[in-house]
Image: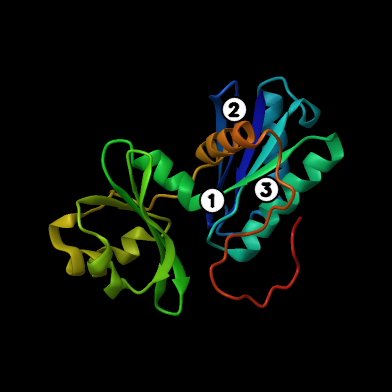
């Protein structure tokens, strides 16, 4: 199966191409959240680099956040457009889940995404199993949620590092740079869900754990 995955949930997005469960190629969109102008040409370039066209893609995958609500909607609209145009299924996957899938294989990983209002989206996993489900919390709440050493990752993790380190001490480990969700792992999650449910999603909506002023539903 050929899968094309998109993630535009944050300031650094990506497009990934997978075939039979393996990554063929990936492109980064370092656009400071202006994904719309580069997403389609980057998708086309990645496919052409491997001798493929949009009609050859058998599964379209898209990251659902949480993150930039506008950015996520751009990704959903693009994936939906391709899927409908070529009669192919579409699957949505959590961008935070993709972060954890990439980083929790050698120990616990904790994903942090800015939720504004002095709060964060937080989730934690170890060896592919959830430890703390995705939720919105204050930084002070981390002391009651994190009881083992974990690598903290996320698009703004360097910004949060001092405050998290102050609260958790040696339990918190940090990468050298901010870590953004990768479309490669969005695609891997989507392929798993596609196999498990035997088809695409009927509705694909951004992950947003609090009420939003955006009323349009992406389906």
Q: Which residue occupies 26% across, 52% down?
A: 174
Q: Is there a contact, CB below 8 Å, between mark 3 and mark 1?
A: no
The answer to whether residue 24 is above or below residue 72 is above
Q: Which residue occupies 27% across, 75% down?
A: 140
Q: Is the C terminus in the top left, top right, bottom left or bottom right quadrant? A: bottom right
Residue 65: image location, x then y, percent:
55, 56
Residue 34: image location, x then y, percent:
63, 58
Q: CA distance from mark 2 to mark 1?
A: 18 Å
Q: Is there a contact, CB below 8 Å, between mark 2 and mark 1?
A: no
In the rendered image, which residue does mark 2 sit on?
A: 18
Residue 157 figure quarter: bottom left
Residue 166: image location, x then y, percent:
18, 69
How many numbered tags mark residues here? 3
Q: CA distance from mark 2 to mark 3?
A: 20 Å
The residue positioned farthest toward the left in the image shown: 170
In the rendered image, which residue does mark 3 sit on?
A: 38
In the rendered image, which residue does mark 1 sit on?
A: 94
């Amino acid at each position: 199966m050929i899968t094309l995955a998109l993630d535009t949930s944050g300031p650094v997005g990506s497009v990934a191409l997978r075939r039979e469960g393996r990554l063929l190629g990936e492109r980064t969109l370092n656009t400071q959240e202006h994904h719309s102008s580069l997403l389609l040409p980057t998708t086309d370039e990645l496919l052409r680099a491997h001798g493929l066209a949009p009609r050859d893609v058998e599964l379209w995958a898209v990251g659902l956040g949480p993150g930039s609500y506008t950015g996520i909607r751009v990704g959903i609209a693009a994936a939906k457009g391709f899927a409908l145009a070529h009669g192919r299924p579409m699957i949505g996957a959590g961008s935070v889940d993709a972060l954890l899938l990439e980083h929790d294989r050698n120990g616990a990983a904790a994903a942090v995404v800015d939720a504004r209002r002095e709060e964060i989206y937080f989730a934690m996993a170890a060896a592919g199993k959830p430890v703390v489900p995705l939720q919105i919390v204050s930084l002070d709440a981390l002391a009651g949620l994190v009881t083992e050493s974990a690598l903290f990752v996320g698009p703004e993790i360097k910004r949060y590092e001092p405050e998290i380190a102050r609260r958790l001490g040696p339990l918190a480990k940090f990468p050298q740079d901010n870590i953004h969700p990768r479309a490669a792992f969005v695609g891997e999650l989507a392929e798993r869900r596609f196999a498990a449910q035997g088809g695409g999603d009927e509705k694909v909506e951004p992950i947003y754990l609090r009420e939003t002023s955006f009323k349009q539903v992406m389906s």
